[in-house]
Amino acid sequence: MGRPLRTILACLALGLGLGAPGLALDLSWDLESGAYLGYAGPWDLSGSLGYGSATTSRIELSAAGPKGPVRVSGRASLETAILTGQAAAKAWALAALPADQVLAPAYSSTSPAPEALLTARLRTAWLRLDPGWASLTLGKQILSYGAAPLWSPVDIFSSLEASGLDTVRRGVDALRLRVPLGDTGMADLVGLPRGKPGEGSYALRLSGLALPGLDLGLLGARRGGGASAQASWLAGADLKLDLGPSFFGELSLAMPDAGGEPVLRAAWGADWSIGDLVLAGEYYWNGGLSPGLDPYGAGSHNAYLSLAWRASDFLSLVSRLQWSSAQDALSGMVLAYLDVAQGARASLYLDLGRSDSASLALTALLGAGLSLAF
């Protein structure tokens, strides 16, 4: 499914919301702006100092039809950003990879990164038909499988990306059929069609409440081959157990068509709320894949810890620590969020990282931002 079809879907959802009687329309908009000072280089501070800034706008429109034999709903969201300095240079370098975005000026591998860059893309654009016994969704949508919050071996469709201070999953072009099984179960069939059927990806996930407090999921999938992917069969399982603290675990097994050893990946961890404190941790083993082949660009062993504290009705403090065996990379971040008004939040953060790379032994970012939601 290409950009023209997603644009048609978005326009159709807008047209339904504005013109069809009995449909409910909801429009939301948020604006986020921030800037940072950064250092990257050796420990002797002989590396480069720089700055970066990003102002991002997201507009989301959703429409839902009246209740009836078949209910129709849709959603479309558009994201635009103005980047300068290091933020523009990073986006320019990543533009060489396949990405659903438009750049101004247009990307060229022979041109240096511009001082300022405008990006735009359609993040989601889907239509849903719900006859009651099932729901069918067509278009660009967020597919989040599994239970792990950061590295998820079972989440075979989505990819991670940094968005401001948070990590989010990107949408994919898909057909999705969901059929409830009893009161708590779900059969979830997903297809990512391509020009050639053999290059598409398809999955069936069964999930439900196995015991009080215990959610289980089973996955079977086929990942098609293409220019940058190897065709393979996949199987996976995930669970989440709530005992006050919540524990989660995931396993996935990939069996390439071309032969070779199967790849087993795993993640497990827990989160726990104690009053105004929230603790979370995760460990991820990528089966010995090189970072270039790992879906998250991670090393064989990876760990993540976070601690969030709601200090008052207006102030929140968050600390994060992340380690990867790839280049023995360790990074930590401390953030402060201040709710300055209804729908307005200010942030201040310090991000430090180190690795065994001589040229990037130390990285540091000091930044501040403001977000508004309407």
Image (spheres, grey):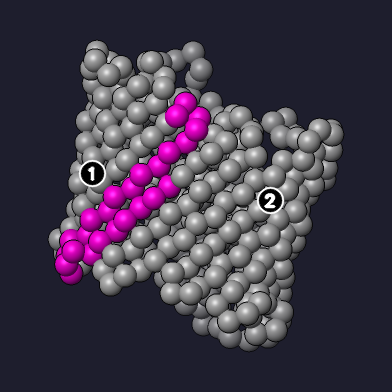
Q: Which residue is mark 1?
A: 349
Q: Is residue 142 above or below residue 321?
A: below
Q: Is residue 324 magenta?
A: yes
Name the residue: 18% across, 58% down. 338
Name the residue: 65% across, 39% down. 287
Find numbered disc 2 in the image and state the secondary structure of the residue it sits on.
strand
- The one nearer the camera, 165 or 46, is 46
Where is residue 254 shown, x and y percent of the image?
A: 74, 44
Label 1 Cα neighbours within 10 Å, binned few <14 / some 14-19 / many ≥20: some
Q: Is residue 215 above or below residue 234?
A: below
Q: Is residue 337 visible?
A: yes
Q: Earlier in the sequence, mark 1 or mark 2?
A: 2
Q: Which residues are magenta?
A: 304-328
- The one nearer the camera, 323 or 223, is 323
Where is residue 51 shown, x and y percent of the image?
A: 24, 28
- Closer to the eye: label 1 or 2: 2
The disc placed on residue 252 is 2
Distance from the alpha carbon under mark 1 to that under mark 2: 35 Å
Going by the image, does 117 lie left or right of 288?
left
